C-alpha cells in the first residue's frame, strides 16, 4: 500500500510560519496562528502515531508544531512588551509623535 500525505501536514507548517511572522503585528495574530498550529499538529501527530506506516510528511507536522510553539512564545513576549509600553508612556503619548519624542529624550537623559 502506498503511503499518503498526513492530513493537514502542510497546513500545520503554514500556520507555524505565520505564527512567527504574526508575532511582529503586536503579537495577537501570531498567538492565534501559533495556537492553531499546535492544536492541529497534536491531532496530526496522534493520527500518525496510530499508523505510521500509512503516512508520509510527518516532518512538516513536527516543524509546524515547533514553529507554532516558538510563535506563541514570541507573541506572548510581544503582548507583554506592548502592555508595558502603553502603561509606561500612556495611550495619548503613543498617539502624539512630538510628545513621544519628548518622553523618549527624557528617558535617555538628554
Image (cartoon, rainbow, N blue to C red):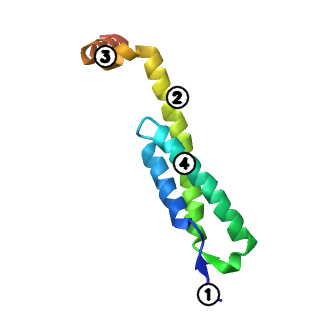
The answer to whether mark 4 and mark 2 are in CB contact below 8 A is no
- For mark 1, give the secondary structure: loop
**In which quadrant is the N terminus drawn?**
bottom right
- For mark 4, give the secondary structure: helix
The answer to which quarter of the image holds residue 9 is: bottom right
Q: Is residue 69 visible?
A: no
- For mark 3, give the secondary structure: helix
Q: Which residue is mark 4?
A: 34
Q: Which residue is mark 2?
A: 80
Q: CA distance from mark 1 to mark 3?
A: 62 Å
Q: CA distance from mark 4 to mark 2?
A: 16 Å
In the depicted structure, whether residue 69 falls above or below residue 91: below
Q: CA distance from mark 1 to mark 4?
A: 32 Å
Q: CA distance from mark 3 to mark 2?
A: 20 Å
Q: CA distance from mark 4 to mark 3?
A: 32 Å
Q: Which residue is mark 1?
A: 2
Q: Is residue 70 left or right of residue 44?
A: left
Q: Nearer the viewer, mark 4 or mark 3?
A: 4
Q: Is residue 96 left or right of residue 73?
A: left
Q: Nearer the viewer, mark 1 or mark 3?
A: 1
The answer to whether mark 1 and mark 4 are in CB contact below 8 A is no
User: Residue at 40% across / 15% down in the picture?
Assistant: 89
Q: Earlier in the sequence, mark 1 or mark 3?
A: 1
Amino acid at each position: 500500500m502506498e503511503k499518503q500525505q498526513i492530513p493537514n501536514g502542510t497546513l500545520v507548517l503554514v500556520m507555524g510560519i505565520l505564527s512567527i511572522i504574526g508575532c511582529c503585528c503586536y503579537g495577537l495574530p501570531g498567538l492565534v496562528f501559533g495556537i492553531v498550529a499546535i492544536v492541529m499538529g497534536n491531532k496530526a501527530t496522534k493520527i500518525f502515531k496510530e499508523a505510521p506506516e500509512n503516512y508520509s510528511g510527518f516532518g512538516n507536522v513536527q516543524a509546524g508544531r515547533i514553529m507554532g510553539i516558538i510563535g506563541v512564545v514570541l507573541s506572548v513576549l510581544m503582548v507583554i512588551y506592548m502592555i508595558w509600553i502603553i502603561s509606561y508612556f500612556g495611550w495619548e503619548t503613543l498617539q502624539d509623535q512630538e510628545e513621544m519624542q519628548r518622553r523618549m529624550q527624557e528617558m535617555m537623559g538628554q
